Image (cartoon, helix red, strand yellow):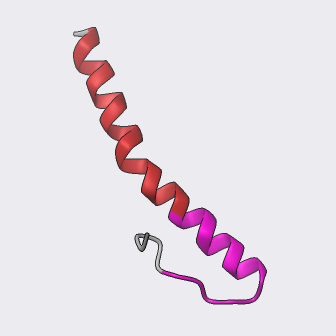
Amino acid sequence: MPYLLQLLQSLTVLAAAPLYAGVLTKASALLQSKHGPRILQP
């Protein structure tokens, strides 16, 4: 059971990492009064 939980946590982190980077890029662009790229765009 602990291995399944560890696997799920790892997959969640891997899936959320690009989203987190996209949100930071979008927020940075908004602070500079620009539109910025879409959240999922690398």
Q: Is residue 3 above or below residue 42?
A: above
The x, y position of residue 38, in whole percent, is 46, 79
Of all residues shown, which one is farthest toward the front? 42
26 vs 10, left or right, is: right
Count of marks, rendered view? 0
Q: Is residue 12 above or below residue 5?
A: below
Of all residues shown, which one is farthest toward the top? 1
37 vs 14, left or right, is: right
Q: Looking at the image, which residue is at 59% across and 84% down?
A: 36
Position of the N terminus, as image quadrant, is top left
Q: Is residue 17 above or below residue 5?
A: below
1 vs 18, left or right, is: left
Q: Looking at the image, which residue is at 43% across and 69% down?
A: 42
Question: In the depicted view, which residue is nearer to us: 12 or 37?
Answer: 37
Q: Main secondary structure of the magenta part?
A: helix
Q: Is residue 36 magenta?
A: yes
Q: Looking at the image, which residue is at 22% across and 19% down?
A: 4
Q: Looking at the image, which residue is at 36% across and 29% down?
A: 9
Of all residues shown, which one is farthest toward the right? 32
Q: Is residue 28 above or below residue 6?
A: below
The x, y position of residue 28, in whole percent, is 70, 72
Magenta residues span 22-37
Q: Is residue 20 magenta?
A: no
Question: In the depicted view, which residue is nearer to us: 2 or 34?
Answer: 34
Occupied quadrant, residue 18: bottom left
